Image (tube, helix red, strand yellow):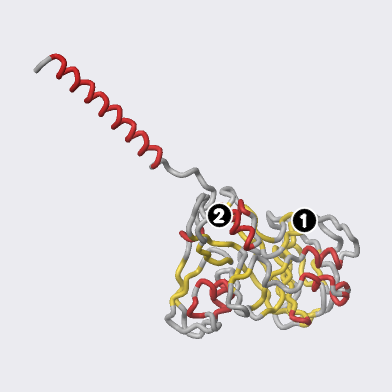
Amino acid sequence: MSITRRYRELIAGSCLAVLALDVLQSSAVVAAPPVDCPTRPALERLRQHKVRPRETLTQIAARYGLVSATLMGMNPAVRNGQVAPGQVLTIPPYNGIVVSLAPGQTIQSAAKSYGVKPDVLFEVNGCQNAPKTVFVPGANWSPVTGKPMAAGQIAVPPKAELDPFLRRDRYPLPLPAALKRAYGWQPTGPNKAVVFASGVDLAAAADTPVYAVADGTVAFVGVQKPWGNLIVVNHARGRQTRYGYLGTLNVKVGQAVRRGQVIAAVGNTPASALRFELRYRSQIGWVAQDPQPYLQAISGTKKPQF
């Protein structure tokens, strides 16, 4: 073999080696693990529930802390509101809908369409930059229109909490309290998992009296996670209030209560707060509404300490 030929072979081999190294490096970049995300994708956290005899859709939704519309959206077979024993339902980790993104649609544009924050939608879906399908928290399938609705659209009309009828209600604590936790979707816990707060936490010391905000009938008294001791009161006009993190309980199920009646005392819990929720009866069950405007309206001040 001539020296010139041998030299050419060595050069070709070196070029192939360099090319192979480039390919390996490129593959390593492509195969690199995604950026760490504080939230596991919601669509990887779906559960299954087999309907038991005499179970209702509302009962199943309540068991998982959801509204019925969420289960209807996830399970087309029960969009008539009826379930049958043996049916298997898909249960999401929290209220929301599954949406397939159209070509060119981004997390940002989807967030705008459904009225949620882009960063929340990004984290809920595992911090993916270009997912084809996303879970939209807070939005729900509507049994009225048969279409998805943006977050908050299933609540009662915005002016309902300003109705003069409601302004006669009594604040649930002796004085307007500081807001320790707001209503809605927000990160919580050491991993900053995004969860939905269906009410507000009002700062209150242990043994602070808790008042019924209006006349009504006690619908529930007992322990329910994550609120500990909980009292639920049904009121006129399809309203319901819920009081959690309680210590002493002064009422029982079925008892009629009057506006301003002491129904309990705040418990000695790490929360150091009263959990207060405002709900309205709708075609899909009891729907949570942000109670802050309502609390502002009945506190007697335009700018209470929220």
Looking at the image, residue 15 sits to the left or right of residue 233; the answer is left
Q: Residue 109 appears at what percent x and percent y?
A: 60, 56
Q: Residue 191 appears at what percent x and percent y?
A: 56, 49
Looking at the image, residue 86 sits to the left or right of residue 251; the answer is left
Task: Examine the rendering and report whether any part of residue 260 can be seen.
Answer: no
- Picture residue at 25% right of the left edge, 29% below the top: 16
Amino acid of disc 2: Thr
> Which numbered mark, 2 or 1, is in the foreground of this view?
2
Work out whether 201 lies above or below 19. Answer: below
- Picture residue at 19% right of the left edge, 20% below the top: 8
Label located before the other in sequence (2 or 1): 2
Q: Residue 30 appears at what percent x and percent y?
A: 39, 41
Q: Residue 159 appears at what percent x and percent y?
A: 81, 71
Q: Quadrant of residue 66?
A: bottom right
Q: Quadrant of residue 194?
A: bottom right
**Residue in front for this viewpoint, 265 or 211:** 211
Residue that carries the numbered disc 1 in the rendered image: 179
User: Under tag 2, what secondary structure?
Assistant: loop
Residue that carries the numbered disc 2 in the rendered image: 106
Q: Quadrant of residue 14?
A: top left
Mark identifier at residue 124: none
Cβ atoms under marks 2 and 1 closer than 8 Å: no
- Picture residue at 37% right of the left edge, 36% below the top: 26
Looking at the image, residue 126 sits to the left or right of residue 280; the answer is left
**Residue in front for this viewpoint, 159 or 94:** 159
Amino acid of disc 1: Leu
Task: Examine the rendering and report whether any part of residue 28 can be seen.
Answer: yes
Q: Residue furthest top?
A: 3
User: Under tag 1, what secondary structure?
Assistant: strand
